[in-house]
Amino acid sequence: MSWARVGIFLSEAARERKRLRSVAETLGLPVLGSNTIRTLRALKPHATTAFILGTGASAAELSDQELEYIQSQFSIGVNQWILHPLIPDVYAYEVDPDVRLLQALDRPEVRDKAPHLLFLKPSRPEDLANVSHIPEFMLKRSFLYSRVNMWTRKSANIADDFNAISCLSSLQMNSDVLLDNGASVARLIALCQLFDYREIVLVGVDLHSTEYFWHRDPALLDGVDLKDPITNQSGALHETLQATNRPFPIDTYVGRVLPKFLARGRTLVVESKSSLLANSIPVFDWGDIFPSCHD
């Protein structure tokens, strides 16, 4: 039944692709396509690792040496990572009611690094205006994309469906509509599959609390004129652990995806051993990168 479910996914992805192009035409933004994927991959041709930079509190514990290494590899900063001093190669952003977040991109260090911006297609017409807050200098490096959740609702099917959809996407270089599970981390894992990195590291994806990196270290916001970001989180645990508005809790999804990464000679790891994902996937070992500093 896997291919039947994948077929349904592809049909929905085709419909979403049409909707995406309609919105892109309205907004005047290009769609994330295969040429852009090649351009992004070519930014650091010798990089072997992709870091997906979440905004959890553990990101505040990264040392200068570790941040420097992340900068040497390929990195994607998720949503409020815009406020972090480390400028990634790509920002992945979805509509936020606090438009100051996009406005915070307009600062000298971001101009100097010239990152790209991947803007998730707004789901509501009233949110289209959010795009107008992208700084003008970033518009030429901003791309619109969308997402579709896998069809299954049985966790045992996640790995095979993920593998089938990823293989097809790699063959067709379909980067405009990404496989998702209602969480930024899920669709960015799918995106990094297209980049064909040997290793994907999840940074600041803690899940055990709703504390963000600036709560742990307020000095990390010194470079931006935004000291009270809106997080839209409530309760003790991160909302992606809930399955109320997504097919699976994110820890279930990531844990089931892992075997297919290993089968294809790749690794999917989490940077912080305190992350709830450390119960599902391996923890990244900085000692492999800096042996003398992590004995």
Image (spheres, rainbow, N blue to C red):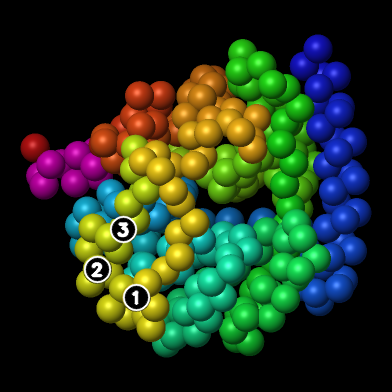
Q: Indicate whether 205 appears above or below 99.
A: above
Three-letter code, disc 3: Phe
Cα separation between marks 1 and 3: 12 Å
On the picture, is 151 further left or further right than 247?
A: right
Three-letter code, disc 1: Lys
Three-letter code, disc 2: Pro
Of 205 and 125, nearer the camera is: 125
For disc 1, the marked residue is 227
Cα separation between marks 2 and 1: 8 Å
Residue depicted at x 32% and y 80%: 223
On the picture, is 91 further left or further right than 60?
A: right
Residue depicted at x 69% and y 81%: 132
SS of the residue at dot 3?
helix
For disc 2, the marked residue is 218
- Asked if residue 106 lies in the magenta stretch, the reply is no
- Say whether disc 1 or disc 3 marks the residue closer to the N-terminus: 3
SS of the residue at dot 2?
helix
Cα separation between marks 3 and 2: 8 Å
- Say whether disc 3 or disc 2 marks the residue closer to the N-terminus: 3
Of 65 and 254, nearer the camera is: 254
The image quarter in which residue 120 lies: bottom right
For disc 3, the marked residue is 213
From which residue to which does the magenta span run? Answer: 286-294
Q: From the top left corner, tell me how far across and down residue 81 is, in percent.
A: 43, 63
On the picture, is 137 further left or further right than 145?
A: left
